[in-house]
Amino acid sequence: MSDAPTRLRREPPPLRRLAVLHTEPRSVRMMRVVVGGVELEGLELPEPAASVRLLIPWPGESFELPTWNGNEFLLADGRRPALRTFTPVHLDDHELTIDIVRHPGGAIADWAETALPGDPCAVSGPGRGETIDELADRYVLLGDETAIPAIEQLLRVIPASMEVDVHLEIEHPDARLVLPDHPSATVMWHPAVDTEPPGTSLRRAIASSPVTGGTRVWAAGEAASMQAIRTHLFDERATPRSHTTIRGYWKVPRS
Ligand SMILES: Cc1cc2nc3c(=O)[nH]c(=O)nc-3n(C[C@H](O)[C@H](O)[C@H](O)COP(=O)(O)OP(=O)(O)OC[C@H]3O[C@@H](n4cnc5c(N)ncnc54)[C@H](O)[C@@H]3O)c2cc1C
């Protein structure tokens, strides 16, 4: 048996108690939820593609703030809370906008379908976002639907002089959204194929994309596909890690 002390993790920023203000579908695959409250005071989101954690009550239960046990947030009875990570889309005064992919069976995805004004929730954050590399001449942005909010923000801040190739994998043709204009961007929407693991089209897209010294790659989506993109870039193409940000946003459960 090891006597190694249990490693404690740094406590995340505190949870701010909020309430739902309103919800509206952005598409058949994306629900926009605006939450608000005075506890948003002092929250700052200086970087694009940052994150916040959203806490909701489990279905049929009353709202409870979990406590940090040195490693994770837990409810009073020891269960994990419904706490997930999202991209903060817009923060204005005491209102925070979040866009949630409508995947049936997700705790927060299902909550977003029926949330009503006044329903309690909380957010913690921010988590780090992206810094645009001024030395780059081209960006390749790859993502599934969960990455659309982050990619929209990146398109707004990548300088017009840089070329941008955007590849988005979508579960439904109507998941396409009008993305922010960028004068040097090319956007490709790839329909997901039922018989292929999520993110396969993104793996194909990067494999056939030139990645020169001036190229920076930002990618987010299902974790295994992101790992495959890392392996491809680092092991097969010797892309410097510092030229990439590749983030697993969700996981297919192990069967
Ligand atoms: C930094 C960061 C930023 C993120 N930004 C966003 C964002 O802006 N919008 C957004 O919608 N998501 C975003 N995500 C992903 C989001 O946190 C996960 O998809 C999360 O699991 C959704 O929670 P849920 O309660 O709906 O589903 P859960 O209850 O966590 O999951 C239930 C089941 O659904 C599966 N699942 C989870 N997500 C998906 C999906 N998208 N499609 C299909 N199956 C899925 C899981 O494998 C699980 O089996 C982000 C993640 C990170 C790390």
Image (cartoon, grey):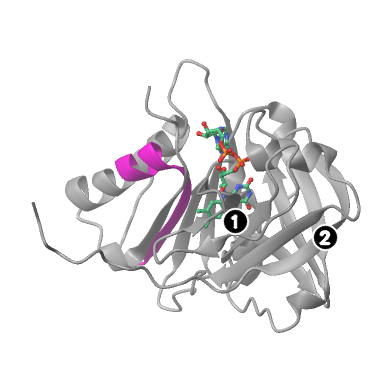
Task: Report, in whole angstroms, how far the alpha carbon at label 2 lies from the one at label 1.
Answer: 27 Å
181 shown above or below 233? below
Q: Which residue is drawn at 31% across and 40% down?
A: 228
The quarter of the picture where the C terminus appears is top left
Residue at far top of view:
195
- Image quarter of residue 241: bottom left
Tell me: 244 left or right of 5: right
Q: Is mark 2 on a helix, strand or loop?
A: strand
Asked if residue 122 can be seen in this view, the reply is: yes
Residue at the disc numbered 1: 151
Q: Which residue lies furthest to the bottom in this view?
A: 42
Q: Is residue 66 above or below residue 175?
A: below
The type of residue carrying mark 1 is Ile
Which structural element holds mark 1?
helix
Image point (40%, 77%), residue name: 135
Residue found at the far left of this picture: 1
Residue at horizontal 36%, vertical 68%?
9
